Each structure stands twice: as structure tokens, then as C-alpha cells.
Image (tube, rainbow, N blue to C red):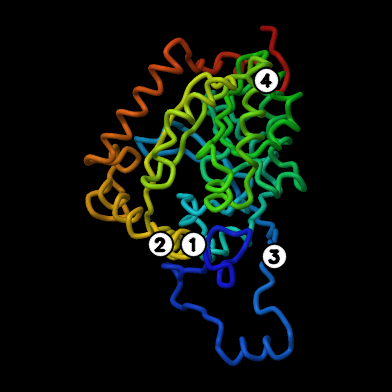
Amino acid sequence: MNSDSFIKGRGAQQNTDNKFSAYSYESRDDFLEFCRLEGESADTNKTQYIPIFPKTIVNKVISTDIGMSYSMNMYQGCEHGCIYCYARNSHEYWGYSAGLDFERKILVKHDAPKLLEAKLKSKSWKACTIVLSGNTDCYQPAEKEFQLTRKCLEVFLKYRHPVGIITKNTLILRDLDILKELNNHGLIGVNISVTSLSEKTRRILEPRTTTIKKRLEAMRVLSSEGIPVNAMLAPIIPGINSHEILNLAKAVSENGAFSMTFTMVRLNGAIGEIFTDWIKKALPDRADKVLHQIQECHGGTLSDSRFGIRGRGEGKIATQIHDMVRLAKHLYFIDKKFPKLNTELHQRFKDGQMKLF
């Protein structure tokens, strides 16, 4: 890795052009020279929190190969900076880049708890698990300041509504009190993402995330309280973490995971350019090999939008990964099962309190 040209603490190393914008932006050489002469930084690399106020918060998921029906996101953009993140492209809809902007310009939906409550109180709404978050991590660093995830969990508990969580941050343990209450009614399922057992790999793939050791500890704490935890081995990236599947499965099983799932990496839209630029700087010795292996799993391209195939991949490398996952499940999860969440209680708590008749 060339440390002189690498932006530390970030995944993306550039801002790609926004496909929805008629203009592109770049720093002029004379501006950069001025900053050099004045001893000023041309880029502060600081995170900005930008308030936004959408009219709705719960989104229906129409993709047939994604294991959720509804999702909601309190934040758009994610400071974790995972280089492979499929959510990067969504930042372009807000007028920003999928690159560094995605990690540094975090949109905060302050009204999320209020909007959620209105949705759950709606007469037309029927209980169905809502996942936090289908796009960006609900326990990313912004949550420590704004506590929108905790406030939303309080709403779910008040209305006895099932909720799923996807995260790779141990800040989730801050809300253990609410999670335990939700679990008493069968209303909570947690998904924790673990991509590697190597801290070196974790640091370059996911620069601002919780360490692997702490994620496994979080699994152990949650499962010891009876809270169901699914381990997400996602994404599997050929040449980077594909050799770790068995060891990952064993580790998450030993730390209490009820089940495990996986997805193959895919680099749609701007993510292909962002990932390619990153790997040539972070892992130049194996960049070409990794990129070619990813392409081999997706019909010769980094991008793959085919429903049913995009998350699984195809070809010899993908087949080998699938075989390894099947073996891992047989070895470490044969007697384990993730429970179905309770959708029966909500109707009796439509008004925020139990109806007796």
C-alpha cells in the first residue's frame, strides 16, 4: 500500500461522478498548489451530518432475491466506509457521489421515530418484519450522537411490532435492555456481518467498523440472552476472504449464532470504479487477480443485476464457494435454526396499548 496517496480511515479513495448530475467536479491544480504553499489542507476529510426530512420512512422491498419485505433507514450514507457496500449507489439519488461523499456526508432523518409510529398506527398496516437497515448501518457512528435507532426500537416495543437489525457495530449492545424486552415477545432478530477473522483485512475493507473480536463478543452477549443472531458472511470476495469460510462459520457458531448466510460480492454502478481504484492502491500485488475472479463469478463483468444470480454468482469459483458454505452449515449449524418473528401481537397494540376486547 502506498501510504502517501492513501486516504487513511476511509474506504473509497475518490469521489466518482454522479450519473444523475450534468456536471462533474475536480480540484484544480492551481487551487491544490495554493493550499500547498499556504500549508492548508485541500480536503479536511471530516464527516458532515446533514438533516433531511422525508415524508415516509418505511420502504417496501420489491427485489425478489433479498430476504426482507420492508426496510427503513434512519441514515443515508455510512461512515463505516466499507469499500464493497452496495448502498453507495443510493447516495447519487441525493445529489452526492457514491465515493467519499457516501462516507463523509451522512444524511440524518430526525423524524424517523415519528414517521415509524405513524406507519404502525395506520389502520391499513399489517404486521410484517421491518428491517433496520436495509441500506446503511443503523448503528454507524452517527447513532451514538442522534440515538434514532434506539428511539425507533422503543416505538417497535410500544406497538409490539417485529423488527430485524443488520449491523456490524457493537453499539447495538447499548440497547440490550430494549432488545431483551422485544425478545420476550419474539419480536427481534439480529444479523451481524462478519467478513474476515483477520484484523488486517477488516481494517482495509471496513476502515471504521468494530473489530472482529468485538463483533464476536456482541454475538455471544446477545445469544446468551436468548436473542436470535444470524451471522452474515457478506460479502465473500474471491482472493480476499473466500478462503476463510470454514473458519468464519466455526467462529460465529461457537459465539452463539443461530444461523449463517452469505452473498457474493458484486460491484454495480459506481462501486466497480471505486473498488478498482481502491484495490490498486490498497492491494496492488493482487488487484488484477481479485478483479478477474470477481468478473468470472458474474459473467465476465464486475456488475451483475440479474435477480437470483447477482447475489450468488456463477461459474467455477462461485460453485466452489457454494460447496464450502454447504459444508460449513453441515459442520457448524446442522442443529441450529433462526426463529420466525411474532406478527400476532401488533394488532392488539395498534394504539400503543393492549386492547382487551
Say which amino acid is labelled 1.
Glu
Q: Which of marks 1 and 4 is nearer the N terminus?
A: 1
Which residue is depicted at the point 53% across and 68% down?
A: 2
Residue 76: image location, x then y, percent: 59, 52
Q: Distance between the residues labelled 2 and 3?
A: 24 Å
Q: Distance between the residues labelled 1 and 4?
A: 35 Å
Q: Distance between the residues labelled 3 and 1?
A: 19 Å
- Cα–Cα gap, marks 4 and 2: 42 Å
Residue that badge 4 annotates: 182
Q: Which amino acid type corresponds to the residue marked 4 in the rendered image?
A: Leu
258 horizontally vs 355: left or right: left
Query: Can residue 83 be seen in this snapshot?
Result: yes
**Mark 1 closeness class: few <14, some 14–19, many ≥20 residues within 10 Å:** many
Q: Do the residues labelled 1 and 2 touch (CB within 8 Å)?
A: no
Pointer 4 or 2: first along the chain:
4
Cβ–Cβ under 8 Å for marks 4 and 2: no
Local secondary structure at mark 3: loop
Are circles 3 and 1 on residues that touch, CB within 8 Å? no
Q: Residue 92 carries which label?
A: 1
Tell which of 336 and 137 is nearer to you. 336
Q: Which residue has dot 3 on it?
A: 46
Q: In x, y percent, where is residue 269?
A: 38, 59
133 is higher (above) or lower (below) than 17 = above
**Do the residues bearing badges 2 and 3 touch, measured as CB atoms within 8 Å?**
no
